[in-house]
């Protein structure tokens, strides 16, 4: 059974940093592209970033470029999202998801809430 | 950026009725389209991938069609558990994008 378990969310002030983690199990993590997708309160889904299986390709949505960094540790079956210079508009539930462009996003974690507010 | 436009925004139907949800892409995405169902407080669930392929465990009442720029998700006979929000998603080009969603509500 595929499981994706996010952690690291919380309440944070504008300008601060946060690191999200996603522990994966139930599939061959080291050959799978992974993604982060967010959902602001009451809004739709927004793709944030993806990472190829070998970390060589890491695209981002324009609104987070230069502030967010996606990475992975295949030895620990974990993908990360380092979020710096957080803004109020980054407030959302952040979902870890299996898949990206080469394979459809087929499994989602339950999400972790990030609240940015002064 | 490929923009996905879903219509209608809200669909009010009764159990047993047929639902047709539309997703239109701003440029051709071949068949690189998925459909997801999301219920309140839950993560999205994959229903259809590559425009017309049902995901594992998805009931046969869900079907997808289309290619290029016009896509449809059809629910042949609505069950009570099908009332939810549905999103389309393209993985043809970066940035990956999602449609704005269609809410299927009980009439």
Image (cartoon, rainbow, N blue to C red):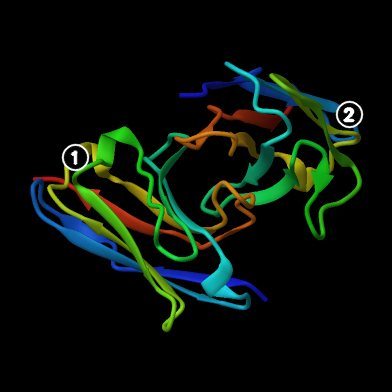
Tag in front: 1 or 2:
1
Residue A104, percent from left and from top = 64, 49
> In the rendered view, does A70 fall on the left or right side of B55?
left
Residue at image x 55%, y 54%?
Answer: B42
- Residue lying farthest bottom? A75
Q: Which mark is residue B17?
A: 2
Q: Dot 1 corresponds to which residue?
A: A88
| Residue nearest the viewer, comparing B5 with A74 | A74
> In the rendered view, does A21 fall on the left or right side of B7?
left
Residue at image x 38%, y 51%?
Answer: A58
Between the C-alphas of marks 1 and 2, the distance is 42 Å
> In the rendered view, does B71 fall on the left or right side of A26?
right
Determine crowd level at label 1: few under 14, some 14-19, many 20+ residues with C-alpha closer than 10 A.
Answer: some
Element carrying mark 1: helix
Quadrant of the frame with the N terminus of chain B: top left
Residue B66 sits in quarter: top right
């Amino acid at each position: 059974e595929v499981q994706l378990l996010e952690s690291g969310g919380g309440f944070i002030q504008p300008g601060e940093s946060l690191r999200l983690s996603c522990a994966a199990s139930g599939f061959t993590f080291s050959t799978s592209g992974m993604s982060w997708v967010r959902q602001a309160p009451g809004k739709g889904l927004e793709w944030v970033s993806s990472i190829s299986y070998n970390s060589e390709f890491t695209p981002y949505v324009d609104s987070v470029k230069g502030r967010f960094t996606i990475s992975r540790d295949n030895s620990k079956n974990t993908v990360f999202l380092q979020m710096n210079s957080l803004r109020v508009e980054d407030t959302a539930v952040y979902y870890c998801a299996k898949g990206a462009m080469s394979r459809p996003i087929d499994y989602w974690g339950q999400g972790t809430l990030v609240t940015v507010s002064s | 950026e490929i923009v996905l436009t879903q219509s209608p925004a809200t669909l009010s139907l009764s159990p047993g009725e047929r639902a047709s949800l539309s997703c239109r892409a701003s440029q051709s995405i071949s068949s690189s389209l998925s459909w997801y169902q999301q219920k309140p407080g839950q993560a999205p669930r994959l229903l259809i991938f590559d425009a017309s392929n049902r995901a594992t465990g998805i009931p046969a009442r869900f079907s997808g069609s289309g290619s290029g720029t016009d896509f449809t998700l059809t629910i042949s006979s609505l069950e009570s558990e099908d009332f939810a929000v549905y999103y389309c998603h393209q993985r043809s080009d970066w940035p990956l994008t999602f449609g704005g969603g269609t809410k299927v509500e009980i009439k």
